Amino acid sequence: MRLFRRDGFDRTTMRAVAKEAGVSVGNAYYYFSSKEHLIQAFYDGIQVEHAERADAVLERETSLEARLRGVLEAWLDVAAPNHEFAAQFFKNAADPASPLSPFSEESTPAREASIELYRRVVDGSEAKMTPALRAELPELLWLLQMGFVLFWVHDASPGQTRTRTLVAQATPLVDRLVRLGRLPVVRGVIDDLMGVVRTIRSTA
Amino acid sequence: MRLFRRDGFDRTTMRAVAKEAGVSVGNAYYYFSSKEHLIQAFYDGIQVEHAERADAVLERETSLEARLRGVLEAWLDVAAPNHEFAAQFFKNAADPASPLSPFSEESTPAREASIELYRRVVDGSEAKMTPALRAELPELLWLLQMGFVLFWVHDASPGQTRTRTLVAQATPLVDRLVRLGRLPVVRGVIDDLMGVVRTIRSTA
DNA sequence: CCGTAGTCTTGAACACGTTCAAACACCTAC
DNA sequence: GTAGGTGTTTGAACGTGTTCAAGACTACGG
């Protein structure tokens, strides 16, 4: 990880990693089946640290907006030091065939833990909504986070301020949309949306 | 392209491509600066063929739903024969640093042409909406298409029927959402959404 | 203490994308 | 027709991720 952060993912060779670790190249492959698998540890680390910070937010905040925004900003805080490096290996994570893809079979535990976090964001808030929406909203919020990550990876602004602006702008909108969902006229549309979410999930 | 389709992107070597073309490896690099650049042609081809089929749809249909659905299904029709191959090089397109990324500087012409197509989808329809929404909806629909492409790439069902189901389910929803936008209560939310879209665009 | 089976470790070798100095072809000017 | 310049072509060579046959180490039963 030290080398990856210093030189970037692509410019760090497996030979350098092996040397730094004091083992042979072949031995590195005995424990990590590919260069990609080396960053699984990084992946997990982000998730653990994010969960911790998110916990602090969820204990503090009660409104849906503040809870969502706090959790997203926690992610940005945790991920910030790795922005450059993350952008470099993002392409591997986007590969449908890669185990690192957030939609992959291998990522199921991490994905479900992440959705579970958003379930707590929703359930612990004082926001009122239909049971159907309450059931699916966590997955929608997780998808939203994936969108933010995509944006963040492409964000070249210093300190990724643009992503922070986007989050600050988008979270009140989510809150308003959820409130809107209580209107009788909107109910039908929400039901259809839930249907779409179910279709998406049944494929993964 | 013949070799790519037959053996897949990764298993096709530049040496094989050069041999098939009857030139040396170095010469291949004289005309295409990387293996990735070879698929730019494929990329362009899809776009051209999609534009043609979309034209036919737009001449025929008048409702927003039918126009949108027709255009999206046209894309699926055009892309279908290349599904396996496309999934293999999708990771390159997802790389923020790659010129093939739909968000990249180099893709600007193709991206704008695509957004322009969705402007025609909107403007040629009989759907009524606020000027602000009418201005931004094309970009939103393009983003939606990117989402469908992401889904399609991960779609392992035979003939990508799941993606087709999703499109069939999602397009009426878009239509309903646009209709909903005319309600006074919803106006404010739409305005906020437009603000988010503008933030997203100003980064790209 | 020896043998053996299982686990770890090694670095040379492989295949690939990419680069580059050299060679070649073609054209224009005189 | 020759000299020189510009654009094209070549394949060997480089650096990379990955593999693999061979060796070294460890544990344990006799």
Image (tube, coloured by chain):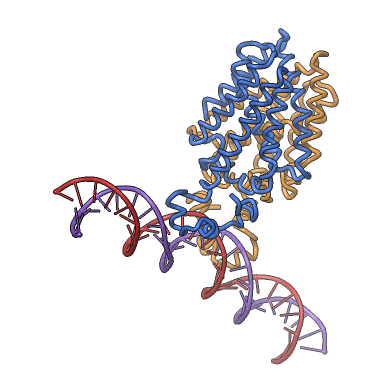
Chain colours: A orange, B blue, C red, D purple
Residue D12 quadrant: bottom left
Q: Residue at x 61, y 11 (%)?
A: B131
Instruction: Where is residue B191? Give x, y as percent.
Output: 63, 14
Query: Which of the pair A51/B183 is nearer the observer?
Result: B183
Q: Is residue A27 above or below residue C3?
A: above
Front-lying residue, A107 or B98: B98
Q: Tell whether A202 sits left or right of B38.
A: right
Task: Please give the name of the residue rendered at 71% of the width and 38% of the height, measured from the top-left corner.
Answer: B151
Quarter of the image where the C terminus of chain A is located = top right
Is residue B29 found left or right of A114 in the rendered image? left
| B64 w.r.t. A29: above or below | above
Observer-nearest of A128 and B46: B46
Could you say which is closer to the camera, residue B58 or residue A89?
B58
Work out whether A2 lies above or below B166: below
Q: Is residue A56 visible?
A: no
**Residue B18 shows up from this direction:** yes
- Kindly identify the residue that appears in the image at 71 percent across and 10 percent down: B182
Residue A90 image position (x, y, % from top left): 59, 44
Q: Given the current orientation, which residue lies at the most extreme top position?
A: B184
From the top left corner, tell me how far across and down residue B136 is, in percent. Answer: 60, 19
Q: How many marks?
A: 0
